[in-house]
Amino acid sequence: KIEFSSSLPNLKIALTGTIGIGKTTVLNKVLSHLNEQPFGFRTVPIIKESALKGFEIVNLRTLEKGTIGYFDENFVIRPIIDSFETVGVKALHDALQYGKAIVMDELGFLEKEALRFKEMVFKVLESDKLVFYVVKSELNEFLENTLKKADSIFEVSKENRDTLPEEIWRYVWDYMKTSSKT
């Protein structure tokens, strides 16, 4: 585990990549080196009877969950805005209040109409916290604007996903060494 003698750096690190490439796996490996418990949210699949039924958002501090999207009978994903506006907003509020490191895994298209949630995402990205966030590869205006807030964007690929966690930590350490000299 990496212990930070001072506060965690004010860095925003985004991970992008295609579906199933390993963005969350890379993020988990990065977070495993962190001595601080990260707060924020994760989105996880809802699987029933071996079938993907939808997705839910999980508050990493309270473990509260809410369904953010479900597949209808035509297998079209339908967003549930209320879960973003309640569970999601609270997760990000908790992260800003209690966390030194914040995780947003992942940002995508289901939250398109979740205005309060998106506002909180930008509050997190404008905070003085260490933020790791995963962004879907199919960009929209909201996702493009979140990427503009990143200090660094790492694209996960088959070729780099095994070495990327170490590269990200090297980036964090180099940033800390440079910023401590100023």
Image: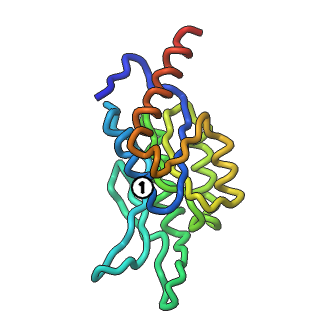
Instruction: Evaluate whether residue 98 shows in this view.
Output: no
Which residue is found at the position 54% from the left and 82% from the top?
Answer: 76
**In the image, residue 138 above or below residue 128:** below
Observer able to see residue 160: yes
Of the residues shown, which amino acid type is indicated by label 1? Answer: Arg
Q: Quadrant of residue 48?
A: bottom left
Q: What residue would you read off at disc 1?
A: 42
Tell me which corner region of the image, top left, top right, bottom left or bottom right, holds residue 38: top left
What residue sits 52% from the left and 90% below the top? 74
Q: Nearer the viewer, residue 44 or 80?
A: 44
What residue appears at the point 28 percent right and 29 percent down from the top-left corner? 1
The x and y percentages for residue 41 are: 43, 53
Percent coordinates x, y for residue 88 in the rendering: 48, 58
Residue at (49% x, 47% y) in the render: 93
> Is label 1 in a helix, a strand or a loop?
strand
Position above or below: 45 against 171: below
Seen from this angle, which residue lies furthest bottom?
73
